[in-house]
Amino acid sequence: AAGGKIASITLPEYRQTIKKDSDAIHTISPSENNQALGTYFSNPELAELSKAEYVLSDKGPTKVFSAQRGTVSIRKEYSRGTTPFSLTSTITIESKDSKKDLGYLMIPVGGNNLVHDINVPIQSWEVVWDQNDKVSRVTVDSIEANEVHQGNTRWLAFGNRYFATTIVNKSETNPDVVVGSEGVFKGGYFRFPIRLKEGKNSATYQIDIYSGPKITEQLESVPGMKALIDYGMFSSLAFYLLKMLQFFYHYVHNYGVAMIILTIAVRLALYPLSLKSYRSMKAMQKLTPQIQTLKEKYKDDVKRQQQEQMALFKAHGVNPMGGCLPMLVQLPVFVALYAVLGNSIELFHAPFFGWVHDLSTKDPFYVYPVLMGVAMLIQQKMTPSVGMDPV
């Protein structure tokens, strides 16, 4: 096998489109990811090992590939991981000469001629990595020259909104993360230093590979990798909302209906805050004539005007911020809910009713956006106006 690498990973249960004859999703393919999960070397003397013909020996569930060039040999072992869509790989490099510094071992993830299309979930390609307990991400359109990121590295991933290939560091040696491009290839790679210890003639590196859908339960098996799903700054809240969505789906077996129930549940939970906001707005509306009188009376003394207004608010028990603060408290919930509905694999190719066969894409006839616009107009008419000066 050339390079002794994983050349293709196919997910037959997931399709490119909702058509029955659509091609299966490939997280790794020779055409789009020909360099991904390979082993490359900065030392020119080892460069041939990247594309050499490896000999395969079968050790039951573990597949072993090996190759040798000059005084250096490499051995790769692959076995199934403990969770679905995962593999474990061990790479051993052995040298028979006296050299202790053999440069770097590089293991990339990425793709060829790919762009970040925010409107197409399976083409929103990005590189994500966890270093020093902080998750960073960059879209392929933003990748230019190679950038080296150093620190305590846990994992590196390349994928789109719903699928990703991730390499997880399980070695004692800590790798750098390099994000960049090489010709048509854009992505990132682990960069392990190959330093043979005194009295040793080999170095071993172990990684876990996860290549599949971004299912929360699967990602949770690796510390911090749940953040591979981009739920934004309110991700902690988003994961709770996802659990609720899955709970409702368990009973109604339709994610569209589950979304409606979840939205209603969220609105009901936040109703006390909404009610408080509306009451405050109504109270402010009643005070509008008196506020206008104060503005006319003290139009040449802004400071006195503000003092009198605050006294008026206090006398009537009205908080001028009472209409805004409850709405601001609700904002994180709705931002998190929007993130869940836009980034959860559960909605990928999930049908609703009628003409809507995929909840992860737009309504093909724009019926629901129009209905939403009408609903917003009705809601605006039902919402009491503050009645204050537009400024």
Image (cartoon, rainbow, N blue to C red):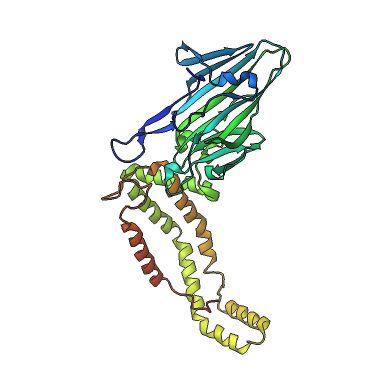
In this view of the protein, which residue sits in the foreground, 387 or 201? Answer: 201
In this view of the protein, which residue sits in the foreground, 259 or 318? Answer: 259
Q: Residue furthest front?
A: 183
In this view of the protein, which residue sits in the foreground, 109 or 346? Answer: 109
Whether 279 is drawn above or below 258: the answer is below
Whether 59 is drawn above or below 302: the answer is above
Is residue 260 visible in the rendered structure shown here?
A: yes
- Is 30 positioned to the left or the right of 103 in the image? left
Whether 81 is drawn above or below 24: the answer is above
State which quarter of the image contains the C terminus.
Answer: bottom right
Q: Position of residue 284 (x, y in %)?
A: 51, 77
Q: Position of residue 239 (x, y in %)?
A: 48, 45
Please give the name of the residue rendered at 58% of the width and 32% of the height, measured from the top-left corner: 189
Q: Residue furthest bottom?
A: 297
Please give the name of the residue rendered at 39% of the width and 31% of the height, measured from the top-left corner: 11
Q: Position of residue 77 (x, y in %)?
A: 52, 17
- Is 121 positioned to the left or the right of 295 in the image? left
Whether 379 is drawn above or below 97: the answer is below
Q: Position of residue 229 (x, y in %)?
A: 49, 42
